[in-house]
Amino acid sequence: MFAEELITAIKIARHIVVLTGAGVSAESGIPTFRDAQTGLWENFDATQLASPQGFQSDPELVWGWYEWRRAQVLGARPNPAHYAIVQFAEQVEQLTLITQNVDDLHERAGSPNVIRLHGSLHQPRCFACASPYAFPEAIPQEPAAGRRLPPSRCPHCNDYIRPGVVWFGESLPEAEWRRAELAAKACDVLLSIGTSALVWPAAQLPIDAARHGAVVVQINPDQTPLNAVARYNIQGKAGEILPGLVDAVAL
Ligand code: BV8
């Protein structure tokens, strides 16, 4: 199933980076980022919805989209891919997990110290004064895919509450980006799992890893620009491939 050299490269690696995208949560029933434009949002480009301009021009459209996505995440469970990464971290000397996702399924599966490049659906804050906001206990009014929803209001300044994610045109959190860059340049193996490798600067990480001599492995059912960079392109679903790979390395 897996090339002998790949298994050996992982076995002898002292530092492994795992970079995940929306595809790692697909088997938990969470639509991938580009699939998340269904219903009312299918006529919008993701970069339009996931941007400060998009939110300012139509806060109810964008807030409805994020609450729809948050309700899906709250109703979802980690899948075998998330659990395989937890097991993998226990088997190797050092594993740095970097995610582009804004769900919390890695943490709920048991992964510690997840480097979140793009924030989280679960850390909303005020658009104006940036005060953190605590969602009321109840699961969000799940807008059927196709309903607008007025954003919650900040208890301090009454401006809109926004999702705690990094939108297009916004800078990544500095400390997280720095840690991710250092890990990519220092690792021996980088596994890119379930990302279309189209969003920057996250897409730079596997390229940096390859440039610094790491073995880059991609797990994705589809082709991506990373196919030209990765030494191993394993075509398939993360939840089906990863458990077998982690077991093969453990032998
Ligand atoms: C920034 C949070 C500085 C919101 C997201 C060069 C350098 C720097 C910036 C840029 C640059 N070129 C362009 C830019 C601008 C922009 C950008 O990258 N644009 C793109 C569209 C070209 N980047 C930025 O704006 C970034 N900021 O650089 O700051 C700056 C400051 C000011 C001005 C300019 C620059 C911020 C980017 C962060 C955006 N926020 N998320 C939210 O989630 O709502 S990104 C968003 O897309 C997701 O979070 C995700 O991280 C990202 C990529 O999506 P994927 O995770 O890859 O998901 P996708 O659906 O695309 O693909 C899923 C894959 O899984 C597919 O390949 C599929 O085949 C596969 N799959 C499906 N099922 C499975 C599977 N794989 C495995 N198993 C399965 N079962």
Image (tube, grey):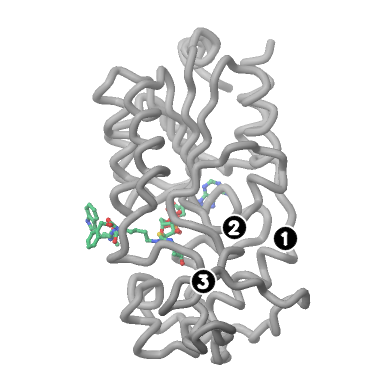
Q: What kind of residue is marked 1?
A: Ala
Q: Which mark is residue 131?
A: 3
| Mark 2 vs mark 3: in front | 3
Q: Residue 93, how many percent across, how many down? A: 57, 15
Element class at badge 2: loop
Q: Is tag 2's residue or tag 3's residue first in the polypeptide sequence? A: 2
Q: Residue 129, how many percent across, how many down? A: 44, 76
Q: Is tag 1's residue or tag 3's residue first in the polypeptide sequence? A: 1
Q: Is tag 2's residue or tag 1's residue first in the polypeptide sequence? A: 1
Q: Residue at x 63, y 33 (%)?
A: 85
Q: Count of labels shown? A: 3
In the foreground, 5 or 119:
119
- Answer yes or no: disc 1 within 8 Å of ligand 1: no
Q: Give the residue pinned by disc 2.
A: 103
Q: Assess whether mark 1 and mark 2 are in contact (beta carbons under 8 angstroms).
A: yes
In the foreground, 152 or 30:
152
Element class at badge 3: loop
Q: Quadrant of the C terminus?
A: top right
Q: CA distance from mark 2 to mark 3?
A: 21 Å
Q: Which mark is residue 76?
A: 1
Q: Assess whether mark 3 and mark 2 are in contact (beta carbons under 8 angstroms).
A: no
- Quarter, ligand 1: bottom left
